[in-house]
Amino acid sequence: MSALAYFLEDEGVPTVAISLIRVQTEKVGNPRSLWVPFELGRPLGPPNDAAFQKNVLATALNLLTATPGPVFLEDYPLDDPTGVDLDSWGPPFALDALEIDLSDEALLQSVLANELRAITPSYQRFVAENRRTTFGVSGLNIDACAAYLAAYLSSPAPANPLPAVSPVQALRWAVDDVKAYYFEAVAAGPGMPSSRQAQGWFWDRTLAARIIIALRKLLLASGDNRTQAIGRMNLVPGVQAIRLGLT
């Protein structure tokens, strides 16, 4: 978007970019930018906080009247208030912490289905309250996504549920949907956990995360460069891969 601003400005359209990576914005040097100290994916700050998000937008739009230039980069002065861990927070459901053999496909499918049943009411409550969901990129329902993840660990590999794309691309989208389902379920409880808390809960406490981590290892061992790239970049966030000692 920072690069695109040049073309818009050449056509006489003033622009303001909201930047999450300051060093990148400094190098691109587009005319007006507001750097925000929020995590990637949250350019306006905490979810469900309309007042805070409007303040970010107003601060950015005010840069349209800024006269210094030709490059103007300002820092947003406030941190994300949900960046602080809540001592009393916990997920709105209980999961069994089971150490099972991931190579036993039948058992894996059964236990993962039980985990999904435990979190589904919370996911449905989140969707009802927020009237939106990021689940659905694969086009599969949650049971089909979970079944494909579990079956992919077996040999031979399962039938591709999305014949229009490669099996590994279908896997990537199914993983995206499973993660979206879990994170929206955990956001349905009282209080808003910090992103670090929510991420830690998912990657440390769920069977779904154990499967995704195992899938990452499987893809990295592939001889196909595209498969390796998806395993390296698209299944486990980099910060979690480092924290979990996966790199």
Image: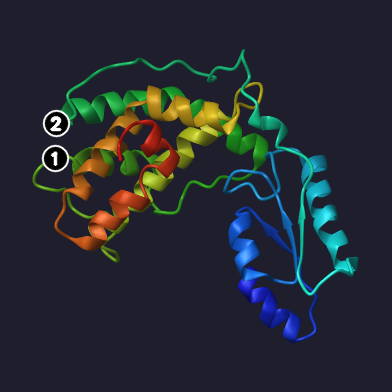
Element type at marker 2? Answer: loop
Name which residue type carries label 2: Ser
The quarter of the picture where the N terminus appears is bottom right
Measured from the top left, where is residue 194 in percent x and y? 60, 29
Question: Where 26 falls versus 103 (above or below)?
Answer: below
Tell me which colouring the rendered structure shows. rainbow
Among the 4 quarters of the image, the one containing residue 190: top right
User: Residue at label 1?
Assistant: 154
Residue 123 visible, this angle: no
Q: Is residue 191 left or right of residue 240?
A: right
Measured from the top left, where is residue 243 in percent x and y? 40, 32
Circle 1 Cα neighbour tier, 10 Å, few/some/many (<14 / 14–19 / ≥20): few
User: Residue at label 2?
Assistant: 103
Measured from the top left, where is residue 195 in percent x and y? 57, 33
Name which residue type carries label 1: Ser
Q: Residue at x 84, y 53 (%)?
A: 59
Q: Residue at x 76, y 66 (%)?
A: 16
Q: Are marks 2 and 1 in contact (CB under 8 Å)?
A: yes
Circle 2 Cα neighbour tier, 10 Å, few/some/many (<14 / 14–19 / ≥20): few
Element type at marker 1? Answer: loop
Front residue of this view, candidates 241 and 96 = 241
